[in-house]
């Protein structure tokens, strides 16, 4: 079956929507001569697919969490953008996913979970105000998603406070944008400094080009050794603020009447646990 080539009409730059509003369309999509192709499709998740995934994951026990996500999407998607997964070889599907935008991969992963199990996600958050844990049922349909109609609308400029030399030229301004999924696949879950490694990897992956150095190119990690701490932290905040795709958080408030946070009606964010066994399971209460 030829995948449907449909684009979602969004604003000139970016637009915030809910998962329910966006449906089976990616936040950014895959480039084509006619623009960004955003549609995707998933299979019904049956016992047959469960066995197939179990076999594949059994062979990939050394894979990290992001690589498991790639395996799930390669198995369960019928098409992504203009690419028909039912006609592609396994290696081709994995390569395509690794080159996709991170926000698109996370979005399809969440939609697959919703289609397979439903919109409710059981969590057990800990209130930051009183330290008590409680049961909470989140609604995946309410997740906020930032979308863009073209890659240029998802990019932004960052002027370095402390310029430094890269490849013999002074770097003063970065053109930033969404990272590819392979930036996440490169991280190892057993890294004791995973948060630091993730920050460095994401910054490198979000640098699309450097003013004065021509078109997009891939930097090696050592080329950012002179990046100042101020610029590093500011860029990290900008990445959070400008990221295309779903927010990987749900908001709630503490149910305890005695909690000082509840008295102020203060909401706090609970990060979604997107580990395969947790995200695609139904916890009992």
Image (spheres, grey):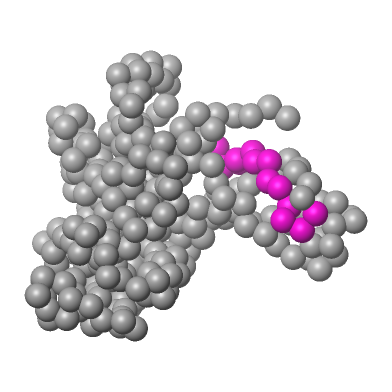
The answer to whether any part of residue 158 appears in the image is yes
Q: Residue at x 46, y 32 (%)?
A: 276
Mainly helix, strand or loop, the magenta region?
loop
- Residue 121 within the magenta-colored segment of the rendering: yes
Q: Nearer the viewer, residue 108 or 265?
A: 265
Q: Position of residue 253 (x, y in %)?
A: 74, 56
The residue sitting at 90% across, 56% down in the picture is 258
Q: List x then y, in percent, for residue 278.
A: 54, 32
Residue visible at 33% across and 30% down in the picture: 63
Q: What is the span of residues highlighted in magenta in the rendered image?
A: 118-130
- Residue at point 20% right, 64% down? 223
User: Horizontally, is 278 left or right of 185 in the view?
Assistant: right
Which is more toward the observer, 27 or 98?
Answer: 98
Quadrant of the rendered image containing residue 285: top right
Q: Is residue 18 left or right of residue 53?
A: right
Q: What x and y, as percent, mark residue 219?
A: 18, 61
């Amino acid at each position: 079956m030829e995948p449907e080539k449909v684009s979602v009409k969004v604003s000139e730059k970016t637009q915030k929507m809910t998962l329910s509003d966006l449906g089976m369309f990616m936040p950014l999509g895959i480039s084509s001569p006619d623009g960004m192709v955003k549609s995707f499709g998933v299979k019904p998740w049956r016992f047959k697919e469960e066995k197939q995934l179990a076999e594949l994951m059994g062979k990939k026990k050394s894979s990290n969490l992001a690589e498991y996500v790639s395996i799930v999407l390669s198995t369960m998607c019928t098409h992504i953008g203009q690419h028909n997964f039912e006609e592609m070889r396994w290696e081709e599907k994995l390569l395509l996913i690794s080159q996709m935008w991170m926000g698109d991969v996370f979005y399809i992963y969440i939609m697959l979970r919703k289609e397979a199990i439903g919109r409710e996600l059981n969590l057990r958050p800990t209130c930051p105000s009183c330290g008590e844990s409680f049961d909470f049922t989140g609604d995946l349909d309410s997740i906020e998603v930032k979308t863009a109609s073209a890659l240029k609308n998802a990019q932004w400029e960052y002027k370095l406070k402390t310029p430094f030399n890269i490849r013999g030229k002074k770097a003063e301004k970065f053109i930033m944008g969404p990272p590819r999924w392979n930036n996440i696949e490169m991280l190892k879950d057993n890294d004791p400094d995973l948060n630091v490694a993730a920050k460095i990897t994401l910054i490198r992956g979000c640098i699309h080009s450097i003013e004065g150095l021509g078109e997009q190119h891939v930097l090696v990690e050592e080329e950012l050794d002179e990046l100042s701490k101020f610029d590093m932290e500011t860029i990290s905040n900008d990445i959070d603020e400008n990221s295309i795709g779903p927010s990987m958080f749900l908001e709630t408030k503490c149910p305890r009447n005695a909690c000082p946070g509840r008295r102020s009606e203060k909401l706090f964010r609970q990060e979604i646990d997107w580990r395969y066994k947790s995200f695609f399971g139904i916890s009992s209460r």
